[in-house]
Amino acid sequence: MAHAASNSQDIPAQKSSFHKSLGEPRTLVNTGLTVLAVALSLVAMFPLFSVLYMLLVKGAALLSPSLFSELTPGAGMDGGGIGNAVVGTLVVVLIATAMALPLGFMGAVYLAEYGGETKLAVVVRFCGKVLTGLPSILAGVFAYAMVVVTTGSFSAFAGGAAMAILMVPTVMLTAESALKAVPSKMKMAAFGMGATRAQVVTQIVIPTAIPGILTGVMLALARAMGETAPLLFTALFSDYWFEGELLKPIASLSVLIYNFAGSPFEHQVALAWAASLVLVTIVLVLNIIAQVATRRPEEH
Amino acid sequence: MTTQQLSPTMTDSKLDSDRASASLPVGRAGADPGVVMDCRIKTLHYGNFLAVRDTDIPIVPNEITSFIGPSGCGKSTVLRSLNRMNDFVNGFRFTGSVHYRGQDIYAPNVDPVAVRRSIGMVFQQPNPFAMSIFKNVAFGLKLNNFKGDYAERVEKALRGAALWDEVKDKLNTSGLSLSGGQQQRLCIARAIAVEPELLLMDEPCSALDPIATRRVEDLMLELKEKYTIAIVTHNLQQAQRVADRTAFLFVDTSAGGRTGYLIEYRPSAELFSDPREERTKAYIRGEFS
């Protein structure tokens, strides 16, 4: 502490006590910025919490088992539920995943393990990034032209196709990240043992990257589930249960909300609120699972 | 694989000069049956960087050969050239030849995967796979279509790597849950499970405590009866304890870069007690890092 006098001209004298002094400008600025950061974070979270609160208040009114077991009621009718819409959303999402997962996953394997920085890989990656921002209605328009017009009818399959277009870029890019995150030294260990590239990819890289890949799939799912525009003119809507016919129109939560929200019938509006609550719950749960359950607990 | 040993007198006279290869009776390159891995590097580049030059190290079967030298002298680079692991480094190219069992492993029609199958490698940093301990050790066996008793081979390998007692009750837990030293022993077990005829080890004990180090060294001494080992080490006592032959590499900074090259390659006992070259003397005495 007792520095030689020669130091005193370049560094101000050190305090002899280490106690925190709230009055000091350095401490004030530190505290001020901390408070500001916390406050702004809370402000940023506010929209999410206020939406959830609003949906809970408005949607809980109609929550009951019959909500899920009844069909959507016609105009002016009472009772009924949103059962067909819940099932419909699940069916469309399943179709979309069945198409998007293989495509996105294989694309990611190519980008991460084989393509590297070749021209083709660069182009594919670029297209993927651009398509993550594709307006969802354009996916719907595309699916309309490719599926609805060619098959001659609105269908669950067309809806699934539109969803898949929205899912593929996200699945591909997050899976690529997950595959690239596999430590290079693990791959070298496998190569050192005389594994071919295909063996390294299938036996080491992919299994190690599964948690990250699943996260990507769930996030893509969560987004796709909530999209309305692509389903408006592909899957349309249906007031009946799904009966295994993929080439017929099908109900979905997002289209139900769209249809009923502006309805003059109060009961239908109430159902739209309930459907919104159900939808946001599913999306939330998917996001939470994606973040929590797919973490590898044992890694340091 | 032939296991004939060079006779003592032949060994001494053959390795009398500093550059061992100049006098070894190799005749046609790589045709010498007494040498399992005939490594002759004239120049080795990574892109424009000359990493190693003029390093000829014939590795004799059923012996432990150690590579010692200061940091950056190319020991690991030379080691990696022996099983074509340098292929993965961008811009790698070299002049010279590497003959394994008499075959040029860099010939155009050679499948590097086949070369690596019969050579085991333990890396400096532990790199277990993200799977159970059992599956880690069994990986090589599966790769080679082993048809025998997996559990028995896994146990044998884990015992050899001095890890069995610590993991025998948790063979199904992830290899990544082990401590660093345990992970390295797991990697050693993984490499020896397939009983490779040549085992390359790059500072395998640097993360291990003295007891585990000793057990691994005992393992090496056991293994050399049937197999051959090449080890890079910074630990001169270790080289003296286990290595039959030692190659000392040094760094040439005369051209502005850092290029590794071989100074001496002789039986360890001779190299440590009576080094020929000044640089070897200085290194052994601790004057270089």
Image (spheres, coloured by chain):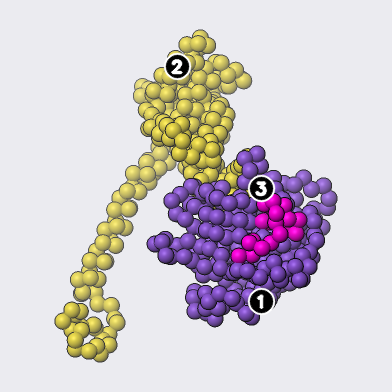
Chain colours: A yellow, B purple
Q: How far is mark 2 from mark 3, CA to CA?
A: 61 Å
Q: Where does the image place residue A119, in percent across and percent down from the top left?
A: 44, 33
Q: Main secondary structure of the magenta part?
A: loop
Is B30 included in the stretch rendered in magenta? yes
Q: Nearer the viewer, residue B218 or B51?
A: B51
Going by the image, does B169 lie left or right of A106? right
Q: Is residue A151 visible?
A: yes
Q: Quadrant of residue B217?
A: bottom right
Q: Is residue B217 above or below residue A257?
A: below
Q: Where does the image place residue A6, in percent across and percent down from the top left?
A: 19, 86
Q: Chain of mark 3?
A: B
Q: Which residue is mark 1?
A: B270
Q: Is residue B76 visible?
A: no
Disc 1 secondary structure class: helix
Label 2 or label 3, whichever lies nearer to me, is 3
Q: Which residue is mark 3?
A: B104
Q: Which residue is mark 2?
A: A144
Q: Where does the image place residue A39, in percent across and percent down from the top left?
A: 29, 56
The residue range painted magenta reads B19-38
- State which quarter of the image contains the N terminus of chain A: bottom left
